[in-house]
């Protein structure tokens, strides 16, 4: 295992502890102008998010209306919109293939299944980082460091297999001297592959594991410098509960 990854895993709660959990429940809100441009303003305010930490399964509720939920499962990929008691309202297999080939950041609308897929795949990975880096088929290795203001951050280049639904396959993660994540770079396939610099803030310990509680998604230029004056997506975590087997 890469030495930086090993230190990061230990700093976030440790692999042995992670192996003993079976569910994570988070209270969070997602905001920013991105959702309105998809046709769904305020769709993710005050969400309860439940995930399986070891396989890609995530539920958001309420989704689009009280008494409704969205569920993403992988293997194969499927998004389902259900009632509170689990009755299926709508579902789609291979939802990633349904996104429009052309994307305009301000004018391209998505349907409910597409919104659910994009958000669910992203947030499952956010809540399982860095432990998802140890899953089968994931490759992680340290690359050259990055200077951000007066700080120097070490970086992991991570490649995800097709078996993990994510923004895109190749991503970069930045860590400070305490091995806390400070930033991640990616280019979502379904939004035209823009150069994203996603900053993570205010890490807190919940049930023995460290999670960032404030995330801000920005864009960066060809030199990797982010425009932190504009955040098309914001994520704020109010609380997290970790359940053990």
Image (cartoon, helix red, strand yellow):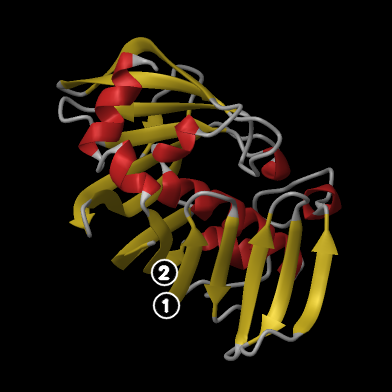
Other-residue count near label 2 (Cα within 10 Å), few / some / many at <14 / 14–19 / ≥20: some
Against 89, is 115 above or below? above
Q: Quadrant of residue 22?
A: bottom left
Other-residue count near label 1 (Cα within 10 Å), few / some / many at <14 / 14–19 / ≥20: some
Q: Quadrant of the C terminus?
A: bottom left
Which residue position is annotated with label 2? Answer: 29
Q: Quadrant of the N terminus?
A: top left
Residue 15 position in % (x across, y down): 33, 38
Residue 58 position in % (x across, y down): 56, 62
Name the residue rendered at 51%, 19% in the picture.
222
Mark 1–mark 2 CB contact (< 8 Å): yes
Against 186, is 88 above or below? below
Q: Quadrant of residue 80?
A: bottom right
Against 186, is 142 above or below? above
Residue 139 position in % (x across, y down): 53, 21
In this rendering, position of residue 128 left or right of residue 69: left
Q: Is residue 109 in view from this perspective?
A: no
**SS at badge 2:** strand
Name the residue rendered at 72%, 48% in the picture.
104
**SS at badge 1:** loop
Name the residue rendered at 25%, 25% in the picture.
7
Which residue position is annotated with label 1? Answer: 46
Task: Report how far apart the C-alphas of labels 1 and 2 lie in the structure.
Answer: 5 Å
In this rendering, position of residue 99 left or right of residue 71: right
Residue 241 position in % (x across, y down): 31, 67
Name the residue rendered at 53%, 34% in the picture.
135
Q: Is residue 49 in view from this perspective?
A: yes
Q: Residue furthest top?
A: 144
């Amino acid at each position: 295992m890469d030495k930086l990854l090993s230190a990061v895993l230990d700093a976030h709660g440790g692999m042995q502890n992670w192996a003993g959990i079976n569910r994570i429940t988070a209270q969070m809100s997602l905001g920013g102008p991105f959702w309105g441009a998809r046709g769904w303003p305020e769709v993710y305010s005050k969400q309860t998010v439940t995930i399986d930490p070891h396989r890609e399964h995530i539920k958001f509720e309420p989704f689009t209306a009280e008494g409704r939920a969205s569920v993403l499962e992988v293997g194969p990929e499927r998004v389902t919109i259900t009632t509170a008691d689990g009755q299926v309202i709508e579902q789609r297999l291979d939802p990633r293939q349904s996104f429009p080939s052309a994307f305009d950041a301000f004018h391209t609308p998505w349907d409910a299944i597409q919104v659910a897929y994009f958000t669910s795949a992203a947030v499952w990975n956010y809540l399982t980082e860095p432990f998802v880096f140890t899953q089968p088929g994931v490759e992680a290795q340290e690359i050259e460091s990055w200077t951000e203001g007066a700080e120097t951050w070490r970086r992991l280049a991570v490649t995800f297999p097709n078996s993990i639904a994510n923004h895109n396959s190749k991503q970069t993660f930045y860590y400070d001297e305490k091995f806390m994540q400070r930033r991640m770079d990616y280019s979502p396939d379904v939004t035209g592959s823009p150069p994203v610099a996603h900053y993570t803030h205010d890490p807190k310990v919940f049930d023995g594991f460290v999670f960032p509680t404030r995330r801000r998604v920005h864009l960066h230029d060809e030199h990797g410098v982010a425009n932190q004056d504009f955040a098309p997506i914001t994520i704020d975590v109010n609380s997290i509960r970790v359940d053990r087997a």
